[in-house]
Image (spheres, rainbow, N blue to C red):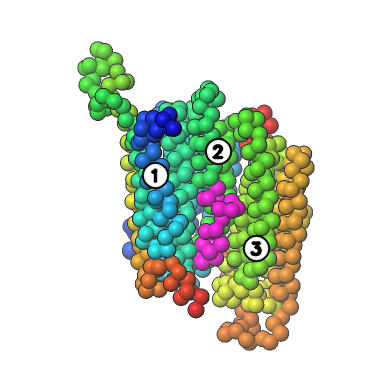
Amino acid sequence: MSFLNLHMYGLTAPLVGAMLLYAAGRLGSRITLPIVFGSLSISLAASVLVFAEVLHVGPFSYTVGNWEPPYGIELVVDHLGALMILLISSVSLAAALSSSRSVAADLHERRRPFFTLYLILIAGLYGLALTGDAFNLYVLLEITSITTYGLIALGRGRAALSSFNYIVMGSIGACFYLLGIGYLYILTGTLNMADLHRIIPLLDGRGAALATAFAFLMVGLWIKMAFFPLHVWLPNAYTDMPDGAAVLIAPLMTKVTIFLMIRVMFSIFSPVYEFIQHMGVQQTIVGVAAVGIVCASAMALGQRDLRRMLAYIIIAEVGYMVGGLWLANAKGMTGAILHIVNDALMTLCLFLAAAAIAHRCGGMEFDRLQGLTRRMPLTMAAFIVGALSMIGVPPTCGFFSKWYLLLGGIEAGQWLYVGALIFSSLVNAVLFFRIIEIAFFPAAAAGDHGGGPQTVREAPQAMLQPLLVSAAALIGVGLATGPIVERVVRFALPVGF
Amino acid sequence: METLLDEIVAKYNYWIYVVLMMIGFYAMIGKSNLVKKLIGMNIFQTAIILMFISAGVKKGGGIPILDKQAVLERGVEAASIVNPLPHVLMLTAIVVAVSVTGVALAILQRIHGQFGTLEEDEILEKIER
């Protein structure tokens, strides 16, 4: 086993695990969890080794099946890709631990199909982080989307309708992306990202067609990542899906799509194309991102359900990262890339806490949270760490990426964006302190709800442990910001920044 | 006016794909029946498939199956064969479209079982109640 194909083990472990699970799961439900945790552990171990290898030796590429690029599909493991696979595999393992418990409670007889979809989704995300081929990216994007549709539809209540609306919007997004790829293929005759990157600057006089292709690719990805004002599908879908799926999908899907936008912007096109040849676009997009941050934060204020509120916060965070990337300076991009990691961990922490609360209290309306700090002290402690990170309080990691984004905004003179970041931080403070206040004071009239707060106990170990680890990771990653920027993010920036 | 007409006639295949796409888009956004939305989605995807396929057409191009002996002697004449790659890509895209449609139909079945209707406004009314 050489280092050169280690990432293939990380990629195929969840995929093989999914097939094994579906085929062998008929024998009995006892082997479900060992297969899930086994394949995710292999994936995590491979990711850690690949990440270490990239840090020591540098980026490398791998040709699947020995079909040479640009004709074969190339997998590229660079600093950003290695960081993403590490993030994906660690978040998914932590999420799976918690899901194993909430799925046992919610969907007991459908546990096998649930985890099959779950593993395929992880394999798809892992592939997205590695692929160096524009069309392969489309296929993997659809693999992740289709499994997400299925996982959302497993929820209760109006989940099926939310899932269908997501299918319609998600398919429009994917079709736009495919159309953009079609334009690029007609213009260049290649689908390999490195090859596209080489040929695109040579296409003088085809500006309109190239701009159309770029616009289609961007809009397609923006729909998938729920960038304001294309976000309408997200709140319902994220509120209605089962808790076990939310802890995986909420931290990873939007963040991986932002990573894909970085790939399109810097690996297929180049900063020269976006920021120098089309100056006005950049201003507009940062402006839209700022408006999106303000609107999503304002809408979060109006919610009475914890998970719905978190869904609106995710939309605001997407605005942070898109705006940061389009600031077109090193600080803004560093902040955006750092925020991909930090936001994934913060969202993981908050959604794990929400899942634990839902598991014990039976729901996530604010009224149910009364007096929770006394009943579930550890869960709420971790929740508070996640909340502080969302607000941006040092030394949690949320502070550092927001700091970089603010500095980038000031350097670029985008005052609207800077104002939106500060507004959103203040709104987050209001939102989370409202919840913390509710949780600190016991219910005025206890016993209003069936099985009310009196019977609520601390979350089970399987949900508590990943939650505490993720809360610790928020502080750990925050303290390690310097080395991360110095050794990873700096290499992920495009040439010239 | 004449130049615009010439433009349309010369590239009629692309205009057809744009019109089809708009029909699909209208059905996805404008219709309230969920099955009609799904059919709109299929029209939308088909339009893109047609776009790719028509981009791969060559006048007088044959099928891209080559005689090894002839290629070794005279090399490949690129003008005489159609580029197979757009077709291969669209095979994959068709597979993706079929699986999305399958998942969507299964979900529609669940919606129908749950609410007894596939009209979006009626479903929303039932959820409100």
Q: Contact, CB < 8 Å: mark 1 with mark 3? A: no
Dot 3 falls on a residue whose secondary structure is: helix
The residue lying toward the viewer, choosing from A286 and A88, is A286
Q: Which residues are drawn in magenta? A: A222-241
* Coordinates of residue A453 in the picture (x, y in percent): 63, 81
Q: Which residue is mark 2?
A: A263
Determine the CA span between mark 3 and mark 2.
30 Å
What residue lies at 36% left-to-right and 35% top-to-bottom?
B12
- The quadrant of the rendering that contains the C terminus of chain A is top right
Chain letter, disc 3 residue? A
Residue A240 in magenta stretch:
yes
- The amino acid sitting under disc 3 is Met
| Residue of label 1 | B19
Separation of marks 1 and 3 at Cα, in angstroms = 37 Å
Rendered view: A357 above or below A93:
below
Asked if marks 1 and 3 fall on the same chain, the answer is: no
Question: How far across and down, in percent of the image, does residue A466 sit?
Answer: 60, 61
- Reading the image, the residue beneath label 3 is A299
Tag 1, which chain?
B
Name the residue type under label 2: Arg
Residue at (51% x, 66% y) in the render: A240
Asked if the residue under mark 2 is in contact with the one under mark 1, i.e. CB atoms within 8 Å, the reply is no
